[in-house]
Image (cartoon, rainbow, N blue to C red):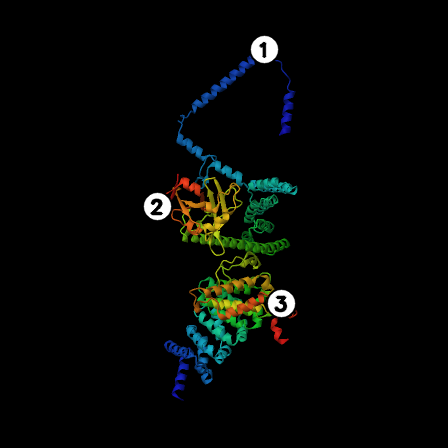
Amino acid sequence: MRLARCQQRDTIMELPKKKYTTEERAALTKKLDDELEQFMEEMAARKAEKSEPKKPFDFDEWCKEIDQHPAFMTELKSTDGKYHDTIEALQAMKYNKEDDEDLQMNAEHHKNEGNKHFKFKKYRWAIDAYTNGLKEKCADKKLNAILHFNCAAAHKHIGNLRSAIKSCSMGRKFDPTNLKGVVRGAECLLELEYGRDALEWIETSKKMFAFVKETSEDSDLNEDEKKFIEKMEELRKKAVELSLLEERNLRKSKVEERKDIESKRKLLDALKSRNLNLSPRLPFDYPELMDNSRLTVSLSFMKKHEIVQFDDENNLIWPILLQYPEVGQIDVLTETCEKTTVGELLQAVLDSPAEWDKEHVYKFENVRFFIADQYDEYLMEVYEWNDFGSVLSTPGYQIKQGLPVIMIFTHDKIKKSLIASEEYENRFTVV
Amino acid sequence: MSEDDKSFQELVQFLAPTSPLQLRRGALEIVTGISAALDGSAGQFFQKSDFALGKAICELCEATASDRTQTFTALTNFASGSIESAEYVLKQSKCVEIAYTSMVANAVYSSVASRLLANISRHFPDRIDEKLKLRNVEYLSILLGQIKNSIDGGDEDRAKFTGFIIVNLTVLQPIRRNILDSQKSTLSLICDILATAKTPEIRECAADILRNLAFDDDVHPILLDQSDEYLCAILAPLMDLNDNLDDDEMSKLPIRLQYYDKERERSEIVRQKLVEALFQLCATKHGREHLRQKGVYPAMRELDKSGEAQNAGPDSKKARTLLSSQEEHTLHALIGILIRYEDEMDVDPSLATIRHLGQA
């Protein structure tokens, strides 16, 4: 074609040039205009002769036409087993035999390109190339399988093990006899430590391979296949070990969960039997709903979180907060057995003065002990012979956030600021 | 001819396959009644007049399938108390073969057939083995497969007695060897039956077979190999989810038994057999070392403790004790071995098995 056009140009070049005068040029222009005018008129006349009445714009008709256009149609309708012309044209483009060969060639080309990238360790480019090959959707199952499996290999190299497994699974659907790819899938699963999944993959792969092999003409195993089957057996053993480990870990976590619930049940039962008033409230009958944070004491100056627990004799051991309201100081005792009496414990605590108590005002003989009621409306005195167990279950007293509070007042302060209730026994209000 | 003899002759005649059905069934009822006697009279009756009755029953069994429930029942009873009757059935009739075939074919009378084989195999395990081998070399796996199928199909009654045949056969050393030589698939099947059967009798049989296997010292290395299949099978039923093992003890156990989450075997007969199996494994150095290495002691300690706990409980009665005195005796002997080191055993290290101790 190109050659022919050149010859034509040559011919034009060879025409002798005629020189026009202005008049001649004007005459020629007029002539050309007239001819065009005449042509237009003739065409209009011709059209007028066979003129059809102009159709008014019909929206429904227009919708139908649009619906039949492949770009807009929402469903594939056929009349008398034939599709609309435009669809048939598309089908021809897609499924034409010649095109099929093209697709296969393209896919092959993408595969080779991918392999080239793979060789140079450009794994992402390789994945793109293989994916493009798959987009060709050629009819060759083995080629598609190879594209998927190669894609998996590239994914595996860059650590995308889950994507690799997905690709292997697609590849196996196309060609279960591609054992190299199947083995790759098992390796990825094992690398992710999915023992049971790996075992299932290997078992199903074996079955699929055996089925295809039995039904194919050549049912003998070749050397490569034997090698991969051996490799698969090795992987199967690993998968069995791993799945046993998985099951063990599952049992272990169940045992731990069970033990946790048991210990919570024990603690809840103990708290319930002691008739304690706790805030926040605890799900006494549903240990599985128990959240230890409801009892955990975490104060900024404490080294670790404290929570009520059992000693060896099944007594409760509490963390206890001592308040000195007059001086705005506190002490925290982390392990106080419920059997210990107030006197026993506090005598030891108050024996030596605190840093802030330079004059040792807070001597045991100098103080009395109180607990506040649930709504902080009044105080109740506790005595040195009371044990903590009975103090904590005093009616009206509430343990907030797992930390019982005991207030220590000096005799002076009591005289000045505490007024005993006339109505109730052992109730004091602060002035 | 006395009146009794005459009646006897008539009874035998009525058992002929050609006699009318009503008559035959009536005669079979009488025969079954006679066969159930436990005072030894059944065997004498069977042998009377040169095995006339035995011959008639066997012939009827061979001739008609419709009478087999009755004929097999009668033969089972006769064979249970009388070795002569058992031998006659085995030697002079095809009843053993018929019984085997009907079991494999799962006939309606397969359960009765298995009882007959169980009784005869108790007297003559070797000859039953020979006969069944002629039918099918793989008969042992087939019978075990039958049990497994009955478990899977939820119809364990059908195969309740099949296990007894195999237990009787495993008295023979070649058969025990055969079980281990069949690429372990037969052993796996037995282990699986022990773990899954709901009927205690079937579990007892599986435990019996596994225990019998432990009697051969030379197979201890095969039984106690790295797969731990056999060890797990006999140890698992002795363990319980509430066993108090610390993490160190847990990590020594075979991985399948770590953090075991099932309850202990309820049948004390099964437990006794399994403890015996472990005890048998202690006969060889390999066995002892393997059991120590796999942390069997803590599991046995917990089994022992569970017995004490049950005994000490406020509502414990003798009938409800977890461990039988026999089991406790064997268990303590086993623990006695497991808690010691090999060099404390006072056994010549060159001695392959302590069974030879007495012969030295």
* Residue at the farthest left position: A423
Residue A417 in view here: yes
Relative placement, left or right, of A205 versus A82 is right
Q: Relative to A189, say whether B210 is above or below.
A: below
Q: Which residue lies under the disc numbered 3?
A: B344
Q: Which three-letter amino acid code belongs to the residue tagged 2?
A: Tyr
Please tell me whether mark 1 or mark 3 is closer to you in this view.
3
Chain assignment, label 2: A
Residues at marks 1 and 3, CA–CA distance in whole angstroms: 135 Å
Few, some or many residues within 10 Å of mark 3 (<14, 14–19, 20+)? few
Residues at marks 1 and 2, CA–CA distance in whole angstroms: 133 Å
Q: Which three-letter amino acid code belongs to the residue tagged 3?
A: Glu
Few, some or many residues within 10 Å of mark 1 (<14, 14–19, 20+)? few
Q: Which three-letter amino acid code belongs to the residue tagged 1?
A: Thr
Few, some or many residues within 10 Å of mark 2 (<14, 14–19, 20+)? few
- Location of the N terminus of chain A (image quadrant): top right
If you read the primary sequence from the N terminus, does the residue marked by circle 1 or circle 2 appear first?
Answer: 1
